């Protein structure tokens, strides 16, 4: 089952805004795009972070690895599907690039991502994000 054009545009706009605040390292605004009890999982490294407060702490601990770099998240190939109780299942591919002070750009990661979205006070929020790193030893996920 597909979604209508207005909802498709709303979801794409959500991600465009979410990735800009992430790439700006604005942890507060980024974590606000999740539900209060939202989660982010990285099965390839056996990690799941639950709740906005835990997300903020994890992200703050990782800030040093982004010093001196411009990081960009590139999302594409969206599938947006209704998922019961007015929620959505959104799957897409993610490519992350990093550019250093010498204008050297490298590919940091390639992943497939699955988000469960819900509305909170009329606004889209992510309840659950699972990031599957593209690596043959982890198999094909999405």
Image (tube, rainbow, N blue to C red):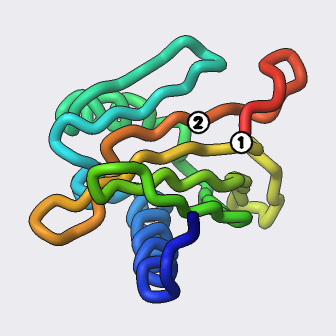
Per the rendering, the mark at residue 131 is 2
From the viewer's side, name the closer residue of 47 and 61: 47
Q: Residues within 10 Å of mark 1 (few under 14, many from 20)?
A: some
Crowding near pointer 2: few (<14 within 10 Å), some, many (20+)?
many
Outermost residue toward the left in this view? 121
User: Toward which corner of the image does residue 138 lie, by quadrant?
Assistant: top right
Quadrant of the image occupied by residue 82: bottom left
Q: Is residue 119 above or below residue 13?
A: above
Whether pointer 1 and pointer 2 mark residues with C-beta atoms closer than 8 Å, the reply is yes
Q: Is residue 27 visible?
A: no
Looking at the rendered structure, which numbered label has been put on residue 111?
Answer: 1
Residue sticking out furthest to the bottom: 6
Residue lying at the far front of the rendered structure? 1
Disc 1 element: strand
At a point 42% along the width and 56% down the height, the residue shown is 88
Up-down relation of residue 74 to residue 111 (above or below)? below
Is 81 above or below relative to 50?
below
Q: Residue at x 16, y 71 (%)?
A: 122
């Amino acid at each position: 089952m597909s979604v209508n054009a207005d909802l498709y545009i709303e979801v794409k706009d959500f991600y465009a805004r979410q990735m800009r605040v992430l790439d700006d390292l604005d942890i507060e605004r980024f974590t606000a795009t999740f539900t209060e009890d939202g989660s982010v999982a990285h099965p390839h490294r056996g990690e799941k972070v639950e709740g906005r407060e835990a997300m903020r702490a994890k992200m703050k601990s990782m800030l040093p690895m982004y010093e001196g770099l411009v990081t960009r998240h590139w999302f594409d190939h969206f599938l947006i599907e209704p998922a019961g109780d007015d929620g959505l299942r959104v799957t897409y591919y993610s490519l992350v690039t990093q550019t250093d002070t010498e204008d050297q750009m490298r590919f940091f990661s390639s992943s497939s991502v699955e988000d469960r979205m819900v509305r909170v006070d009329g606004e889209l929020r992510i309840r659950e994000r699972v990031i599957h790193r593209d690596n043959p030893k982890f198999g094909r996920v999405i």
